[in-house]
Image (cartoon, grey):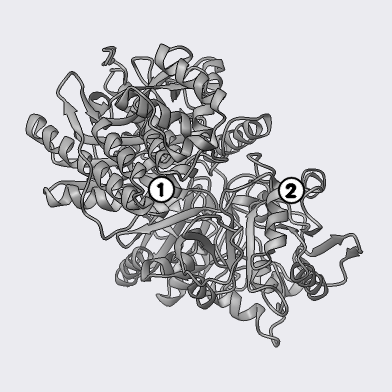
Amino acid sequence: MDRVRKQIRVRGIVQGVGFRPFVYRLAHRFHLQGHVRNTGDGVLMEVEGSPQPVEEFLAGVAREHPPLAQITETVVTELVPTGETGFAVQPTCEEPLQFTLVSPDLATCSDCHREFTDPRDRRFGYPFINCTNCGPRYSIIRDLPYDRAATSMAGFGMCPRCHAEYEDPGSRRFHAEPNACAACGPSLTLESPGGICARDAAAVLAEARRLLAGGRILAIKGLGGFQLACDAENNDAVRLLRQRKHRPDKPFAVMVAGLEQAERLCLVGATDREALLSPERPIVILERRPDAAISEAVAPGNRTLGVMLPYTPLHALLFDGACPRVLVMTSGNISEEPIVTDNEDARKRLGAVADAFLFHDRDIYVRADDSVARTFEGQPRVLRRARGYAPKPIDLGGDFGEVFACGGELKNTFCLTKGRYALVSQHIGDLENHETLEFFHETLSHMKKLFRVEPRVVAHDLHPDYLSTRFACQLAHVERIAVQHHHAHIAACMAENELRDKVIGVAFDGTGYGTDGRIWGGEFLVADLARFDRRAHLRYVPLAGGDAAVREPWRAALSYLIETFGVVPDLPIFHKVAEKEREIVEALIRRRRNTVETSSCGRLFDAVAAIVGLAAKVSFEGQAAIQLETVADAEMTTHYPFEIEMSEPWQIDMRPAIREIANEVRRGAPAAGVSTKFHNTMAAAVAEVCLLLRRSDGLNRVCLSGGTFQNAFLLSKSVAALRRHGFEVLLHSKVPPNDGGLSLGQAVVAATGVQRQARPLAHLDTRAA
């Protein structure tokens, strides 16, 4: 009988997802001989047998591979049959300087959940159960290929029963590298003022539940770092956590045991359910039910809640027994510091926050915060990309070489490109302190080693004072390319939608350094991946106080009111501001001293929120805009007037809208109506400017990006207005629309500029408005 032998090399996310055991079982199904092994760039297999079974095997690899695997390339080579007998999983063969992809950390699968909740199972109640379909991956990997010795599980030797599963091709744990049980794997310890509790997992968890039910704050070592937990129905506990964590207003996320509990708190649509139950298990932003049994201090003045379901066995076991029904589950850090990962560091940094510590002894090698998503038009859209998503690659559809993009200052991520893939880091945070910068450095070093990347092209923001820009400028022997902030936003949206040709880009956010030296933020660009032309923007207004203007929206209101009326109307918001302080700021604005000119859409939202009386001062970025969105009413369709000045570039003048808003507030108009009409106004302006650009440039694709488009009300109104006029609208889903997506845009702009032997800033807009 004729025999054939073929070598199949698959690349993609094919390590740590059960690919080798899948291949083993598939080969046995078709009675083929050969072997399979991990390599430095994927999985390599050789199969030998009759032609038809070999072809069926190849089809099965493509069609039946494990659900968490992602095959990006398959190379099949004809070999000479050797007469090999049997099929084996061979030891890993590392090939130096090769590249393979890494799976993110994955939520507990249904099979493991069934086992640790079954009293008859030997892993009943074990908090670290996992298999090839779930559990830690990225957070425990030291290097590739993905073998136990290259993870933080290296110190845990498998007991005979676990090792037998590891060697058994029929087991779900065949070559599952983190495989363990209570006899040989990680274990829990609880430290509290009452002493150390480490008798067994059941006793530790029972004491943890007792503390939570008693109003205590617990620091819990999770998958990618520590979390701070308390009873979300206990108002005193939540307020105490806010006080200790120095987080006065920003919403906390909550965790509940399952979908039924989530639906008691919030309105949960079909796509929301899918996101909550997905292997990524992000925090999902949901509309809160008015009668939700939860402390108002969890999300003050907000009609949404960030809800997540347990994604580790430890979380799920915590909800057994007498645990509170809803737990605040927030990042284990102080203020804007990185999430804590080490036990001893947790004692030092969180000792003044937590009443007790729930430790385990498996090291976290890579820190990763919880991801955040919000569903829109039947799709989850990432607002913070971390655990569960990073470092999943973004396929760029073409070779972009090796580029390192530093990202921005706020909500920082960085990006490495490797051929056709963009590898965006997990959420790093705001680069405002030494600890976060250290996190940036350690993650960059790790990802460069993991993915074998040594870029010689470095992209960064135009802003000279960003720490990410300074970092780029300190690098030696690299080509540095500055990328304008809003071009990077639009390019990121283009890249994840695999667009290359020119688009209309609408970039709305709070702050971005412009090529004219001013602060941009309400921008309409005509752009591709190499160049952009700024065609329109919100009319500049002077803003006094720099960062103070972000923390104190009344300053933005004052600027818009002076620009609109010449005098400052008597509005309730100014009764909350010291008269002397207001007079000083007003004088600065009138004299254009110590002010910056800005077209920021974020500051416009701040101004309107202040004029309406919702926010004089805020404690976190975007708070005023969130409050404005919260009171909006979807039923109203009217909008305020605005003007478009056909200068070069065009300017969208919102003074007519500000005039009517202020007058309505003075007449006692409800905030809900004013907010709704303002949102409608912004959507109408987006549509009108895009119509003008379609007439002038013949473009029908519109990319919406920037942090302002996290506002779901504005996004829905803008998308609807554009589609009514026949536009094709492209949005973010894989990376955030906020500055967490900047690094992707920077990377593709820089790479495209190098490939075209052009520079992204070959066209500079130096015209003053």
* Amino acid at the residue labelled 2: Arg
Residue ID at (69%, 46%): 333
- State the image coordinates of residue 514 (x, y, percent, origin top left): 36, 20
Q: In which quarter of the image is residue 193?
A: bottom right
Please tell me how crowded label 2 is: few (under 14), some (14-19), or many (20+) other residues with Cα within 10 Å: some
Residue ID at (11%, 48%): 725
* Quadrant of image for the C terminus: top left
Check residue 628 in the rendering and tell me which mark sits there, or answer none: 1
The residue at the far right in this view is 195
Question: Quick check: marks 2 and 1 in contact, CB under 8 Å?
Answer: no
Look at the picture and state if 367 lies above or below 123: above
* Amino acid at the residue labelled 1: Leu
- State the image coordinates of residue 596 (x, y, percent, origin top left): 43, 18
Look at the picture and state if 455 lies above or below 121: above
Residue 504 seen in this snapshot: yes
Look at the picture and state if 729 lies above or below 446: below
Judge depth for marks 2 and 1 and give the one in front: 1
Residue 341 seen in this snapshot: no
Considering depth in this image, is 48 or 188 the residue closer to the camera? 188
Q: Distance between the residues labelled 2 and 1?
A: 28 Å
Look at the picture and state if 230 lies above or below 768: below
Considering depth in this image, is 386 or 130 the residue closer to the camera? 386
Q: Quadrant of residue 556?
A: top left
Q: Earlier in the sequence, mark 2 or mark 1?
A: 2
Say which element carries label 1.
helix
Say which element carries label 2.
helix
Please tell me how crowded label 1 is: few (under 14), some (14-19), or many (20+) other residues with Cα within 10 Å: many
Considering depth in this image, is 120 or 468 the residue closer to the camera? 468
The reply, left or right, for residue 187 in relation to residue 537 is right
Considering depth in this image, is 721 or 480 the residue closer to the camera? 721
Q: Which residue is identified by label 2?
A: 244
